[in-house]
Image (tube, grey):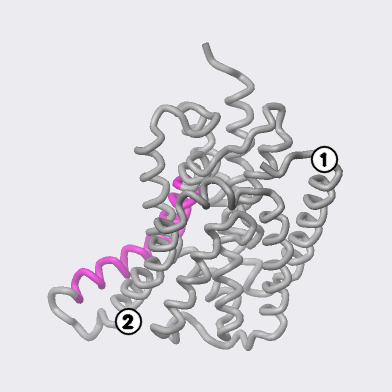
Amino acid sequence: MIDLREWLEAAFLGLVQGLTEFLPISSSAHLRIVGAFLPSATDPGAAFTAVTQIGTEAAVLLYFRKDIWRIATAWLRWLRTNRPEDRDDARMGWLVIVGTVPIVILGLLFKDAIETSLRNLWITATMLIGFGLLLGLADRVGAKRLTLDRLSWRDGILFGFAQAMALIPGVSRSGGTITAGLMMGYTREAAARYSFLLAIPAVLASGFYQLLKSWGQFGPFGPGSTALATIIAFVVGYGVIVVFLRLVSTRSYMPFVIYRVIAGGALIAALSTGLIAAR
């Protein structure tokens, strides 16, 4: 028998995932917080979060399909022929691979903490506020001159470590990498585009790992409701990518900074008054 409440909650969380994955406000934090306010008052869990992220990364694959195909084919040709005309795209492929290494290593080393203690809502609230203020600082002081063709090996590695910080709910994968990019002098659009490309290997690997590991039960949700959430995340996420990349080319990140600080403050108030539990 279908549990209607489970399916409705999963669908709503899929909507939240799609809306927040690409914005610098932390999708994992929002899933964790929203889950606490749903009728079941449950943490969706790391497995559900990782699997629904497959949906949003599928949106990235669709939106950036031409860039991804060009980079991937150039990288493969470069391995065989070292053609000069493939150098720039092949280099971008290597930078994405190298930038993925930190989140893979740290994700494996701190796997248990990521799935348990780091999901404490006091930590989430602190990260929302702290990294929100860092994003605001970076947006204000960053030179915003460099484009992706100026991406160096050093910067690629720094982007990778910034992405790895998103293993902590509240940091935000895009927020961490965009903040690092702005601090290093990249334009808002360049930092956002590279953030999306860099996330593809790590998010898909994590999502499919959790899919195989947790098949049959993704935290409080079954495979059917989780699949529904993933599809919704894909559709909504694609729309968010289109709008977000248009906005960041002309607007600052300050609205996201203000939102993060308010959301973090509201969460602290809810925790302090006992409205929701930290775990």
Looking at the picture, how far across and down is residue 185, in whole percent?
58, 86
Residue 69 among magenta residues: yes
Give the overall secondary structure of the magenta segment. helix
The reply to whether residue 234 is in sight is no
Q: Counting residues from the N terminus, which is met first, the one under dot 1 or under dot 2? A: 2
Q: Nearer the viewer, residue 245 or 12?
A: 12
Q: Amino acid at mark 1?
A: Gly
The reply to whether residue 206 is in sight is yes
The reply, left or right, for residue 161 in relation to residue 6 is left
Q: Which mark is residue 77?
A: none
The residue labelled by disc 2 is 88
Looking at the picture, how far across and down is residue 150, in whole percent?
44, 86
The reply, left or right, for residue 270 in relation to residue 27 is right
Tag 2 secondary structure: helix
Neighbourhood count class around disc 2 (C-alpha, 10 Å): few under 14, some 14–19, many 20 upward: some
The reply, left or right, for residue 198 in relation to residue 266 is left
Q: Are marks 1 and 2 in contact (CB under 8 Å)?
A: no
Q: Nearer the viewer, residue 74 or 176?
A: 176
Q: CA distance from mark 1 to mark 2?
A: 54 Å
Residue found 35% across the figure and 72% down from its top: 98
Range of residues picked out in magenta: 54-78
Q: Amino acid at mark 2?
A: Asp
In the image, which is nearer the foreground, mark 1 or mark 2? 1
The residue labelled by disc 1 is 274
Looking at the picture, how far across and down is residue 158, in whole percent?
48, 77
The reply, left or right, for residue 42 in relation to residue 237 is right
Residue found 67% across the figure and 79% down from its top: 138
